[in-house]
Image (tube, rainbow, N blue to C red):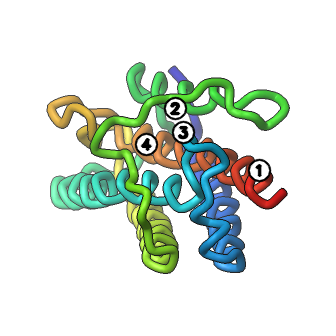
């Protein structure tokens, strides 16, 4: 399990999210035809990847907000250090272990059924929802600085009875986005040839 100075962890998460936000803003400059193009029939388009990420935001952003609300009400104040839990750390490491040295993705992972995107997507709607979700995640990170992200828990999407530490939820969501933005970069390189 990883241990962090809490302020350093928040800085790291904010920096990674800023990189993702910049990359997502750049997608607005690309035509919807390119964003909708699948590099191969069994591979997702950029829009499908973003819609997959949106599906995670739809679950996790309200769950995070609910957890923060409870922590604020019960006065679970922040701590100077943060230790991840074994399950949350496993999820995060799984995301990062998929990224190879050459910025390719090691193995294809099968998305849970409820997080699989459809083929017909509206580029503007998908991008707008993603940017709004990213902004909301930034705001939740700011709010979470005032609570104990180790004691505060959130349920995971694939088994709602199972919870992980809020700090690990943030780490997982941002690692998940980082992995998929590498996929987006590789997809664009493939379909723009």
Task: Note whether 55 is above or below 132 in the view shown.
Answer: above
| Position in image of residue 25 (x %, y %) | 65, 74
Task: Give the class, few, some or many, for how many residues have Cα within 10 Å of label 2's Cα (few <14, many ≥20).
Answer: some
Q: Residues within 10 Å of mark 3 (few under 14, many from 20)?
A: few
Label 3's element?
loop
Judging depth in this view, the residue of 37 and 186 nearest the camera is 37
- Looking at the image, is 83 positioned above or below residue 118? above
- Disc 3 target residue: 42
Location of mark 2 (residue) = 92
Viewer-closest of 161 and 126? 126
Quote the CA–CA distance across marks 4 and 3.
Answer: 34 Å
The relative height of residue 174 versus residue 103 in the rendered view (above or below) is below
Q: CA distance from mark 1 to mark 2?
A: 27 Å
Measured Cα–Cα span from mark 4 to mark 1: 35 Å
Q: State which mark lies toward you, 1 or 2.
A: 1
Q: Position of residue 38 (x, y in %)?
A: 60, 52
> Which one is earlier in the sequence, the residue at label 4 or at label 1?
4
Mark 1 or mark 2, which has the lower sequence index?
A: 2
Identified at 50% across, 29% down, the residue is 109
SS at badge 2: helix
105 or 122: which is nearer to us?
Answer: 122
List the residue tagged with mark 1: 190
Alpha carbon distance from label 3 to label 1: 14 Å
Q: Which residue is mark 4?
A: 167
Q: First in sequence, mark 2 or 3: give its number.
A: 3
Could you tell me if residue 181 is visible in this image? yes
Return the x and y of residue 16 as percentages of the image width and height.
Answer: 65, 54
Disc nearer the start of the sequence (2/4): 2
């Amino acid at each position: 399990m990883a241990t962090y100075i809490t302020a350093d962890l928040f800085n790291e998460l904010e920096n990674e999210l800023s990189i993702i936000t910049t990359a997502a803003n750049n997608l607005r400059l690309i035509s919807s035809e390119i964003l909708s193009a699948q590099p191969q029939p069994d591979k997702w388009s950029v829009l499908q990847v973003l819609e997959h990420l949106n599906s995670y935001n739809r679950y996790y952003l309200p769950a995070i907000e609910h957890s923060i609300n409870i922590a604020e009400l019960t006065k679970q104040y922040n701590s100077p250090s943060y230790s991840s839990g074994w399950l949350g750390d496993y999820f995060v490491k799984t995301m990062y272990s998929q990224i190879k040295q050459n910025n390719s993705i090691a193995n294809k992972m099968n998305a849970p059924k409820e997080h699989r995107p459809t083929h017909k997507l509206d580029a503007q709607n998908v991008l707008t929802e993603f940017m709004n979700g990213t902004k909301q995640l930034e705001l939740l990170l700011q709010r979470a600085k005032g609570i104990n992200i180790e004691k505060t828990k959130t349920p995971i999407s694939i088994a709602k009875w199972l919870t992980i530490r809020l700090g690990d939820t943030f780490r997982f969501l941002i690692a998940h986005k980082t992995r998929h933005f590498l996929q987006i970069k590789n997809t664009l390189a493939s379909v723009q040839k």
